[in-house]
Image (tube, helix red, strand yellow):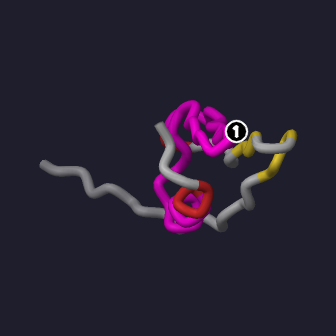
Amino acid sequence: MTQARLDLKRSPVPVKEMLPGIFAFPPNPDSFGGISYLIVSEGTTFMVDVPEFIDENLSFIEGKGKPR
């Protein structure tokens, strides 16, 4: 017997700029509510953890540059 996976549509919560160049993504339900951060400094972009894989987050990340 196979179990069907439910794909629930979630309302996107905007990314918040916590400090200049430090952006916090909403908690990711797939990683037990972990919060991911994008840090942009002097042309370098770092990603700490992985946000929820939705179009809004991908567009935001692409708009800030390719993370390392």
Q: Quadrant of residue 5?
A: bottom left
Front-most of residues 17 and 35: 17
Residue at x-position 24% and y-position 51%: 3
Q: Nearer the viewer, residue 15 or 8?
A: 15
Highlighted range, magenta? 31-60
Is residue 50 left or right of 1 when viewed as pictured? right
Q: In terms of depth relative to the viewer, which is nearer, 54 or 2?
A: 54
Q: Residues within 10 Å of mark 1 (few under 14, many from 20)?
A: few
Q: Quadrant of residue 18?
A: top right
Does residue 57 belong to the magenta stretch?
Answer: yes
- Vertical position of residue 13 compared to residue 32: above or below: below
Residue in the foreground of this view, choosing between 58 and 63: 63
Q: Residue at x 64, y 41 (%)?
A: 38
Amino acid, disc 1: Ser
Residue 30 position in % (x across, y down): 49, 41
Judged from the image, the secondary structure of the residue bearing numbered disc 1 is strand
Q: Is residue 63 left or right of residue 6?
A: right
- Count of numbered badges drawn on the protein: 1
**Residue 1 % position (x, y):** 13, 48
Residue at 69% from the left image edge and 48% from the top image edge: 26
Judged from this view, the residue extending furthest toward the front is 42
Tell me if residue 17 is in the magenta stretch.
no
Residue sticking out furthest to the left: 1
- Measured as percent of width and height from the top left, residue 52 is found at 53, 50
- Looking at the image, which residue is at 77% across and 43% down? 21
Residue that extends furthest to the right in the rendered view of this protein:
19
Residue at image mark 1: 41
Compared to residue 9, the image places residue 43 above or below, namely above
